[in-house]
């Protein structure tokens, strides 16, 4: 299995990216003032690649994913460009966008019970997607639905087509949601914390299913998660988000071995390791910032042990360390020494 | 096992079932009453000052066990001894004393703190109820507690909703410590927290345990956390302990195939070590309909005919290592 395809970053692409997000900004009005949930995010996804987006609550990872498919509703405001195979999804008329959404780009969510329609059978929901995005006739749709259920590992696929979502276990429900997303043969699957609500043995099965389908269907995946273990086991490249910005991006192996942003380093150190039993963890002090009162400079500076006055002057831009690895930390040299 | 010397808590053969509510449709269709078998004969002992980790997936009974220990549930059968006394028989002042000595910290501080009480009021209530301080002593004790869990002193005048998840979990810990307990039962203490904040709370728990000589039951589904914090670990599956051993031995060489599967399924932090094979096949069975024999047999790669018929007993394979398996992954000491 090809775990490390030709990676792409920024604009110096080796292969043409399938999806390019440029300057994405998402703002919401809140009772305590306007807040910027996402502030100038650039992302690229290459064909066949699994891109991970990691971050804690409020980092903007899930809204970024939703914005790609135009799922942010007013009063949320979205700006920037989402380039999908040469077209900007942001300016696409709703009718054409609907062909892409659920068609060329599939999406799965954390909680299948709220994403699936509880009063329609799983079979109806798969056939619905097939009707919308394929030219198959009714009989072919039925056959394809059984095939899809079987493909995602639902036993007795034919009989279970007539079951409702509540008759499925959590893991099977997630498989059913994947089957619906795959019905249209998408080129890109967006997955928002797909295994967070699942038990660890079921999570393992679902992640391996997604990886298997990625290879078989030659599909790209964007996986949003807070779990660094999930990233390590499934993604080719990683973008780490903090307070609405990408703070570091690069190949997973590089970021885990040689992080160059103080936040990435802090996250990795927060996870207990086998050799440090009952020792204090190198936690990050303080709390994530509130989005409506972000610091002027680097949002991580108040919690950062490397921070100096210059961190508070301006928001550090992402700088390229090599062809693939970028960091938004002016002290990346010190971070390297501390790793 | 309860004969073990120095055991602060000894649990033996604890069993607990819940009758599921029958809907009108169930009655009309004549469907029988469904019984959830949450605990099916759980036995273990915890030494004073020890941290025992209890790990398992949904429906394994870990939370029911915690609730039985603090008498939020009354098990149908079995016995819990605390410092040699039968906990389930305690009444009146003796029962109140037990509740002071054994405190529970819940997963969700949003729902376990009274939203209409300031943090100070919530702490004072606990202190006054158990008559631990009086008059000005109460305020002094509150200040001391907040300092202990590293919260600013003005916390006492504020309400729970004013705090972040991590701070609220510190308040939950302060509330438990307010009554000077000997034993803390932490049920998914940090599961709802972001990883950077998780680490802070774990550090706090480790430090408090040293300072206050607490005995801790750390119940969680996160294997990395359990490994980090526990001296010994009990692995539960469908209402029973399947393996109980010293942490390092359990993690480096699991004896029960379920423990091995759990360890394999937990995503490793090292991207260079990936596997493409499922750690374990199949779904978690429902605790309403527990498989015959060994409850893990339908998913177990080693299962033989005997596993389907005969439930394995939790037995000692080597000193300090117990497993409930007919075909353990490590040989039993002869």
Image (cartoon, grey):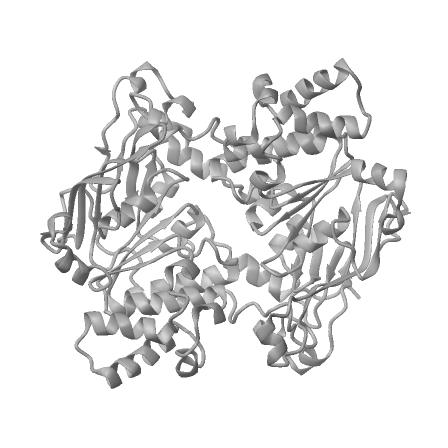
x, y percent for residue B334: 80, 66
Quadrant of image for the N terminus of chain A: bottom left
- Residue at 72% x, 28% y: name it: B125
Q: Position of residue B309 (x, y in %)?
A: 71, 80
Q: How many marks?
A: 0
Camera-side residue: B61 or A129? A129
Percent position of residue A69, x then y: 23, 53
- Residue lying at 35% horizontally and 66% vertically, measured from the top left: A178
Q: Is residue B70 above or below residue A281?
A: below
Residue at image coords 53%, 35%: B199
Quarter-of-image position of residue A141: bottom left
Residue B252 vs residue B128, the one in the foreground: B128
Q: Looking at the image, can residue A7 be seen?
A: no
Q: Quadrant of residue A37?
A: top left
B21 is higher (above) or lower (below) than A31: below
Q: Is residue B156 left or right of residue B245?
A: left
**Does A283 appear above or below A43?**
above
The answer to whether A315 appears left or right of A280 in the picture is left
Instruction: Tell whether A197 sits left or right of B48.
Output: left
Q: Which of the 4 quarters of the picture holds residue A120? A: bottom left
Q: In front here: B288 or B56?
A: B288
Which quarter of the rendering shows the C terminus of chain A? top left
Note whether A163 is above or below A71 in the view shown.
below
Q: Residue furthest bottom?
A: A139
Residue A145 visible, this angle: yes
Q: Position of residue A54 (x, y in %)?
A: 36, 44
């Amino acid at each position: 299995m090809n775990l490390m395809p030709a990676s792409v970053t920024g604009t110096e692409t080796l292969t043409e990216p399938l999806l390019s997000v440029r300057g994405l900004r998402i703002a919401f009005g809140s009772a305590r003032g306007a807040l910027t949930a996402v502030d100038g995010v650039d992302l690229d996804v290459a064909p066949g690649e699994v891109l991970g987006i990691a971050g804690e609550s409020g980092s903007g990872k899930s809204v970024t994913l939703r914005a790609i498919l135009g799922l942010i509703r007013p009063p949320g405001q979205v700006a920037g460009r989402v380039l999908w195979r040469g077209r900007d999804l942001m300016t696409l008329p709703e009718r054409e966008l609907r062909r892409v959404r659920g068609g060329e780009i599939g999406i799965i969510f954390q909680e299948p019970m709220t994403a699936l329609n509880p009063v329609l059978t799983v079979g109806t929901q798969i056939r619905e997607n097939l009707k919308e995005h394929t030219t198959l006739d009714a009989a072919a749709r039925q056959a394809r639905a059984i095939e899809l259920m079987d493909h995602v590992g639902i036993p007795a696929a034919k009989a279970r087509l007539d079951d409702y979502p509540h008759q499925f276990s959590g893991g099977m429900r997630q498989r059913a949601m994947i089957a619906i997303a795959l019905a249209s043969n998408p080129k890109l699957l967006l997955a928002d914390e797909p295994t967070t609500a699942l038990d660890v043995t079921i999570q393992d099965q679902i992640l391996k299913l997604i990886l298997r389908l990625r290879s078989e269907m030659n599909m790209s995946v964007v996986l949003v998660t807070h779990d660094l273990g999930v990233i390590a086991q499934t993604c080719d490249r990683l973008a780490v988000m903090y307070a609405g910005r990408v703070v570091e991006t690069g190949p997973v192996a590089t970021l885990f071995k040689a992080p160059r942003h103080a936040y990435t380093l802090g996250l990795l150190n927060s996870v207990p390791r086998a050799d440090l039993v009952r020792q204090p963890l190198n936690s990050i002090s303080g709390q994530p910032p509130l989005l409506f009162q972000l610091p002027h400079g680097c949002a991580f500076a108040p919690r950062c042990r490397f921070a100096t006055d210059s961190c508070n002057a301006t928001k550090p831009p992402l700088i390229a360390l090599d062809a693939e690895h970028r960091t938004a930390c002016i002290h990346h040299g010190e971070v390297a020494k501390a790793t | 096992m309860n004969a073990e010397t120095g055991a602060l808590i000894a649990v033996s053969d604890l069993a607990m079932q819940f009758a599921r509510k029958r809907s009108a449709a169930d009655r009309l269709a004549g469907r029988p009453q469904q019984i959830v078998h949450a605990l099916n004969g759980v036995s273990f002992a915890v030494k004073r000052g020890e941290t025992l980790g209890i790990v398992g997936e949904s429906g394994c009974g870990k939370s029911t066990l915690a609730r039985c220990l603090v008498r939020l549930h009354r098990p149908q059968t079995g016995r819990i001894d605390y410092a040699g006394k039968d906990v389930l028989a305690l009444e009146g002042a003796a029962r109140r004393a037990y509740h002071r000595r054994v405190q529970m910290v819940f997963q969700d501080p949003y729902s376990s703190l009274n939203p209409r009480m300031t943090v100070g009021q919530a702490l004072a209530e606990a202190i006054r109820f158990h008559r631990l301080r009086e008059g000005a002593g109460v305020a002094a004790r509150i200040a001391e507690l907040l300092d202990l869990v590293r919260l600013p002193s003005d916390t006492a005048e504020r309400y729970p909703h004013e705090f972040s998840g991590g701070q609220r979990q510190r308040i939950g810990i302060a509330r438990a410590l307010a009554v000077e307990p000997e034993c803390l039962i932490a049920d998914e203490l940090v599961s709802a927290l972001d990883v950077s904040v998780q680490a802070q709370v774990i550090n706090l728990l480790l430090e408090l345990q040293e300072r206050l000589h607490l005995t801790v039951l750390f119940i969680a589904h996160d294997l990395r956390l359990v490994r980090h914090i526990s001296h010994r670990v009990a692995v539960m599956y469908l209402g029973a302990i399947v393996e109980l051993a010293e942490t390092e031995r359990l993690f480096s060489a699991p004896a029960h195939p379920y423990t091995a599967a759990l360890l394999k399924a937990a995503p490793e932090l090292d991207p260079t070590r990936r596997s493409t094979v499922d750690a374990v096949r199949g779904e978690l069975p429902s605790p309403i309909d527990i498989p015959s024999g060994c409850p893990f047999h339908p998913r177990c790669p080693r299962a033989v005919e005997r596993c389907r018929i005969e439930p394995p007993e939790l037995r000692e394979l080597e000193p300090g290592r117990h497993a409930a398996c007919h075909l353990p992954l490590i040989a039993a000491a002869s």
